[in-house]
Image (tube, rainbow, N blue to C red):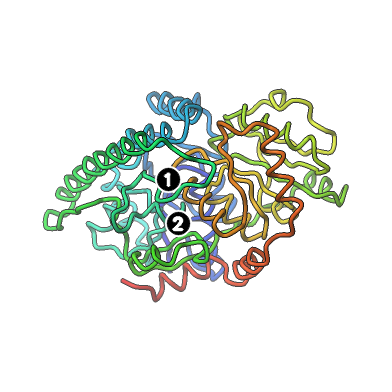
């Protein structure tokens, strides 16, 4: 049996998708990953095959840098970073305006490339990133049954009267101006309509007899897989989803890191793990504020600085571990608190480790995810553009002083007992069509 995994050329997307594929790899089956060259090393580290597939202009092997992107994509990335400094609504509006070129880049050309990959690989089963819209177009137009993996908060697949790009929930720290929110929703509705027209135009070329979509952001594959715990999803919204499986989490294995192991063994003091992900580590001002806040606490800190120069963090205590990239899963397994931007990998990996979170969300589904964590009592949220070191220190102190909620400990146990890769394989083998 052969499994084909279709992933954008981004580490944050490939890590969970490749982790899901380990259920097939460990069963002795062939796994082929269709992605770009930037993440080739990740594919090889998982022991999988790679075939070339470029789903978009950009790429990210782990820490993204604008200067490494092709012309046009570099300016778009800088524009996104600038928008995060202006605020949440401004960031969401910037992302909405770029949506067509971002998510439906060269749809017919990419779809033809996907069809060619399928013809060459001859897979028995396929899983694809939900945000790889052009790839999903190809699979739908060809009648190829596939697992559609939503890697972000489940609101990445809209239901009911939701509009893609407009958060269905906000954490308490965010109180956007109603007028600005109304403008954002109108923009997202216009983008939805334009995006859907582009989807339908490409679909008409690929499969002239296919019915047109009313909302391309509501389209899903044959087997819907949500990389998120069901316990954090509102039952009312769950009822609106098509047939689906909540994977819980897809926590990757990590190679041994002697430096990290030595650091972990050096002390029993509480550990705070800090990371703003592969994109948002560019926000040196926020990481510096977090560092200043944590210097005042009796903790050891493991901080993944990404693009931020170490000098920008201020004085770094000798007991801290600061590197551009750190083994997140390993460190979360020993941490008392995670300070995070609220990306899907960070959230699900922290939940699996039973670690409370202080969330500093910037964009996309991070707001809905932070709101869900607050509602569950698994963390606190602050606005990264407003919270200074004193506010961050108070929130971190409160989370460190309290014992992890029993519900979080129980959820962590369930996520360990029922790993996402096993759930995905069962769903794909006998899931809904």
Q: Nearer the viewer, residue 267 or 285?
A: 285
100 vs 153, left or right, is left
Which quadrant, please, contains the C terminus?
Answer: bottom left
Q: Nearer the viewer, residue 268 or 115?
A: 268
Quadrant assignment, res 195? top left
Checking the image for residue 268, the label placed there is none
114 vs 150, left or right, is left
**Place of residue 357 in the rendered image (x, y in percent of width and height, measured from the top left):** 64, 50
Closer to the eye: label 1 or 2: 1
Report the residue at 80% width, 50% height from top.
270
Badge 2 element: strand
Label 1: how many Cα within 10 Å (few below 14, some 14–19, many 20+): many
Q: Residue furthest bottom?
A: 430
Q: Nearer the viewer, residue 312 or 425?
A: 312
* Residue bearing the label numbered 1: 8
256 vs 30, left or right, is right
- The residues tagged by marks 1 and 2 sit, at their Cα atoms, a distance apart of 14 Å
Report the residue at 65% width, 32% height from top.
287
Which quadrant, please, contains the N terminus?
Answer: bottom left
Q: Are marks 1 and 2 in contact (CB under 8 Å)?
A: no
**Place of residue 197 in the rendered image (x, y in percent of width and height, measured from the top left):** 18, 44
Q: Residue furthest left?
A: 209
* Residue bearing the label numbered 2: 32
């Amino acid at each position: 049996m052969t499994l084909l995994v279709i992933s954008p050329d981004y580490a944050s997307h490939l890590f969970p998708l490749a982790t899901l594929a380990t259920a097939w790899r460990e069963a002795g089956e062939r796994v082929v990953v269709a992605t770009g060259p930037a993440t080739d090393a990740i594919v090889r580290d998982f022991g999988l095959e790679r075939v070339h597939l470029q789903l978009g202009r950009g790429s990210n092997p782990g820490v993204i840098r604008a200067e490494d992107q092709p012309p046009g994509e570099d300016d778009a990335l800088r524009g996104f970073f600038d928008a995060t400094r202006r605020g949440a609504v401004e960031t969401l509006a910037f992302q909405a305006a770029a949506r067509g070129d971002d998510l439906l880049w060269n749809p017919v050309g990419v779809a033809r490339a996907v069809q060619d990959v399928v013809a060459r690989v001859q897979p028995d089963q396929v899983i694809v990133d939900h945000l790889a819209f052009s790839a999903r177009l190809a699979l739908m137009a060809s009648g190829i049954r596939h697992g559609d993996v939503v890697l972000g908060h489940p609101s990445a697949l809209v239901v009911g009267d939701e509009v893609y790009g407009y958060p269905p929930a906000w954490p308490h720290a965010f109180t956007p101006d109603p007028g600005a929110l109304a403008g954002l929703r109108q923009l997202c509705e216009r983008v939805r309509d334009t995006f859907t027209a582009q989807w339908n135009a490409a679909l008409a070329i690929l499969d002239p007899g296919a019915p047109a979509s009313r909302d391309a952001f509501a389209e899903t594959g044959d087997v819907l897989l949500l990389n998120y715990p069901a316990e954090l999803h509102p039952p009312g919204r769950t009822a609106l989803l098509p047939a689906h499986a909540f994977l819980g989490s897809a926590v990757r294995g990590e190679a041994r890191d002697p430096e990290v192991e030595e650091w972990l063994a050096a002390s029993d003091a509480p550990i705070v793990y800090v990371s703003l992900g592969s994109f948002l580590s560019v926000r040196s001002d926020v990481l510096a504020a977090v560092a200043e806040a944590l210097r005042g606490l009796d903790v050891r800190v493991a901080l993944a600085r990404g693009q931020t120069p170490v000098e920008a963090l201020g004085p770094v205590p000798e007991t801290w571990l600061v590197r551009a990239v750190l083994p997140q899963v390993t460190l979360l397994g020993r941490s008392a608190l995670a300070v995070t931007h609220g990306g899907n990998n960070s959230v699900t990996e922290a939940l699996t480790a039973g670690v409370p979170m202080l969330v500093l969300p910037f964009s996309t589904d991070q707001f809905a995810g932070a709101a869900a964590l607050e509602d569950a009592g698994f963390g606190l949220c602050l606005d990264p553009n407003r919270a200074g070191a004193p506010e961050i220190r108070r929130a971190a102190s409160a989370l460190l002083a309290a014992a992890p909620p029993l519900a979080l400990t129980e959820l962590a146990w369930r996520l360990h007992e029922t790993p996402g890769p096993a759930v995905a394989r069962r769903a794909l083998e006998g899931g809904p069509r």
